[in-house]
Image (spheres, rainbow, N blue to C red):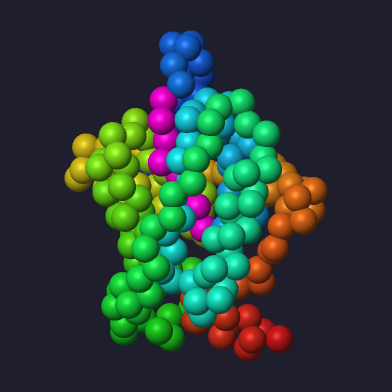
Amino acid sequence: MNQAKQNYQKILDETLAYLTEQKSVPTLLLHACCAPCSSYVLEYLSNYFYITVFYYNPNISPREEYEKRVEELRRFVRELPAKNKITFLEGRYEPERFYEIARGFETVPEGGERCFRCYRLRLLEAVCQAKAGGFDYFTTTLSISPLKNAEKLNCIGKELSEQYGMPYLYSDFKKKNGYKRSVELSQEYHLYRQDFCGCVYSRQAVERRD
């Protein structure tokens, strides 16, 4: 028998309601992939957390694309009005780590095992940073994308949470019109919206469709 899928937005709602009831403003390490995906998530979660945006994306290539995305995210963090403080932390650019975990999965279609391994790589770095920095929670913006598997992301987050003893903030940010709001904010702040996920394989997939 297949296990029923979790409603991760409902779990998030319950967590946020509890924090509001406790009048608590915990710290959150938020792994972010780009400014458009971060836009709604930051607008939403900055009402409940002191957020550190953690940009760690060794999958993005070429280097110029990586730099363009990181600078656009820095700009958005500076310009977004937020109830609670948002800070920015850039991780190391380590494309060799991505190619290592992608080896043997280069031809797997987008949304398959190669992507799942990439989720894990980035969330692993996030949980390690959160643990070292003494944060209360960690999570990622990735679930806002209609092309990302929220079930898989949250399962990886749960596994790493248990392994490292670091609370994971469950989410499916595309819910509650989150993705729609991210498009609106991208237009409002004139954010650069890329047409591929980031890695060379996702770029090739877009080029094949064109």
Q: Position of residue 159 (x, y in %)?
A: 27, 47
Answer with left or right where residue 159 lies relative to residue 206: left
At a point 60% along the width and 72% down the height, the residue shown is 196
Most frequent secondary structure within the magenta stretch: strand
Task: Identify the image quadrant of the C terminus.
Answer: bottom right
Residues drawn in magenta: 26-33
Residue in the foreground of this view, choosing between 113 and 91: 91
Question: Looking at the rendering, which quadrant does residue 177 occupy?
Answer: top right
Residue at 71% in and 57% down: 191
* Residue 200 locus on image (x, y percent): 50, 81
The reply to whether residue 103 is in sight is yes
In this view, 149 is above or below 105? above
Examine the rendered structure and indicate whether residue 186 appears above or below residue 117.
Answer: above
Report x, y in % for residue 66.
52, 70
Of residue 101 and residue 53, the one placed in the foreground of this image is: 53
Q: Is residue 121 magenta?
A: no
Q: Residue at x 51, y 58 (%)?
A: 33
In the rendered image of this protein, does residue 20 appear above or below residue 4?
A: above
Could you tell me how many numbered marks the image carries? 0
156, 193: nearer the viewer? 193
Identify the residue at horizontal 50%, vertical 40% (top origin).
87
Nearer to the camera, 191 or 120: 191
Q: Is residue 21 left or right of residue 47?
A: left
- Residue 24 x, y percent position in the rendering: 44, 16
Q: Is residue 9 visible?
A: no
